[in-house]
Amino acid sequence: MDSQVLVALGLSMLGGLSTSLGALFVIINQTPNLKMLGLLQGFAAGLMLSISFLDLAHNALNSIGFLRGNLWFFAGVIFFALVSSFIPEPTLSPTPNLQNKKKGEDDGGKDIMKKHRRQVFYSGIVTAIGISLHNFPEGMAVFLGSIKGLRVGINLALAISLHNIPEGVAVALPVYFATQSKWQAFKIATLSGLAEPLGVIIVAYLFPSSLSPEVLEGLLGSVGGVMAFLTLHEMLPLAFDYAGQKNAVKAVFLGMAFMSASLYFLQTSLPEDMSL
């Protein structure tokens, strides 16, 4: 069990620290290309949908039956819908200056940001809190996936890592422009991602060392419901806003194809004792 916790902790650290990559993107490119961020968000949405429906929910339906599999899946949907109603929704552009930047009006955008530094900084902190609360169950998902098998854990970590890069941008962008401090932007974005390995540590002590296969499949089905809701409720709207609907949909299907290919290659390349 200790080795499973260490593997899950390592995978969740990979996902959590991906927020730092998003922060670096903001720091290096002071005027980020929001269309590219939208495409990245759409690609990550495709990864999440693929692993939710074609892997986690699919396995739950086959393992514990259609009715119970659906009950577990929609229990995850309802659970995260309730959670999301109590926490702030992360956004990539909490203030109007980003729209000005999108139009190339850099100076005007900076002036607006300077006039509203306190509000902008607050929005960045609120976003960081919201993303931390989102990342916590993602760490739990990686842990449960790692119990089921290394393939599931790796695929969850990959999808979550790409998903967390735009989240790092969401935190770092307002903090950087509000404080003019690259270190503050990087630090706050990184801390928001560390909620993910924290989720692994906590859930490792909450769950028994050996779960029954039926309960484990049901929990993973619920994780699929959580990720499906997160994708459709949070990620796709942002992708549509910044990349346009047609481009975002193309990015979604590209992400689904990428994840389907990774599912296949990981299944065929991992050693037999590490596969499902």
Image (cartoon, helix red, strand yellow):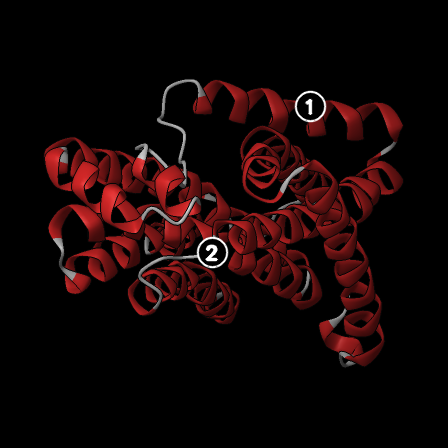
Q: Looking at the image, which is closer to me, 168 or 110?
A: 110
**Residue 244 lies in what quarter of the image?**
top right
Q: Is residue 53 left or right of residue 203?
A: right
Q: Is residue 171 above or below residue 33?
A: above
Q: Dot 2 corresponds to which residue?
A: 33
Whether residues under marks 1 and 2 lie with C-beta atoms below 8 angstroms apart, the answer is: no
Circle 2: element type: loop
For the residues labelled 1 and 2, the Cα–Cα distance comes to 36 Å
Question: Would you call the spot at circle 1 few (<14 residues within 10 Å), some (14-19), or many (20 or more)?
Answer: many
- The location of residue 170, given as percent across then percent down, is 37, 46
Q: Looking at the image, which is closer to me, 257 or 140?
A: 257
Q: Is residue 213 left or right of residue 200?
A: right
Evaluate whether residue 66 shows in this view. yes
Q: Nearer the viewer, mark 1 or mark 2?
A: 2
Q: Looking at the image, which is closer to me, 101 or 245?
A: 101
Q: Residue at 58%, 55% (x, y): give it.
A: 40
Circle 1: element type: helix
How many marks the image carries: the answer is 2
- The location of residue 49, given as percent across then percent down, is 71, 43
Query: In the rendered structure, which amino acid carries the disc numbered 2?
Result: Asn
Query: In the rendered structure, which amino acid carries the disc numbered 1?
Result: Phe
Question: Would you call the spot at circle 2 few (<14 residues within 10 Å), some (14-19), or many (20 or more)?
Answer: some
The numbered mark, 1 or 2, whose residue comes first in the sequence reads: 2
Q: Looking at the image, which is closer to me, 252 or 68?
A: 252
| Number of the label disc, if any, that sits on residue 241 | none
Q: Dot 1 corresponds to which residue?
A: 74
Q: Quadrant of the C terminus?
A: bottom right
Q: Residue at 70%, 28% (x, y): give it.
A: 72
- The location of residue 254, given as percent across then percent down, is 77, 56
- The location of residue 16, given as percent across then percent down, is 41, 59
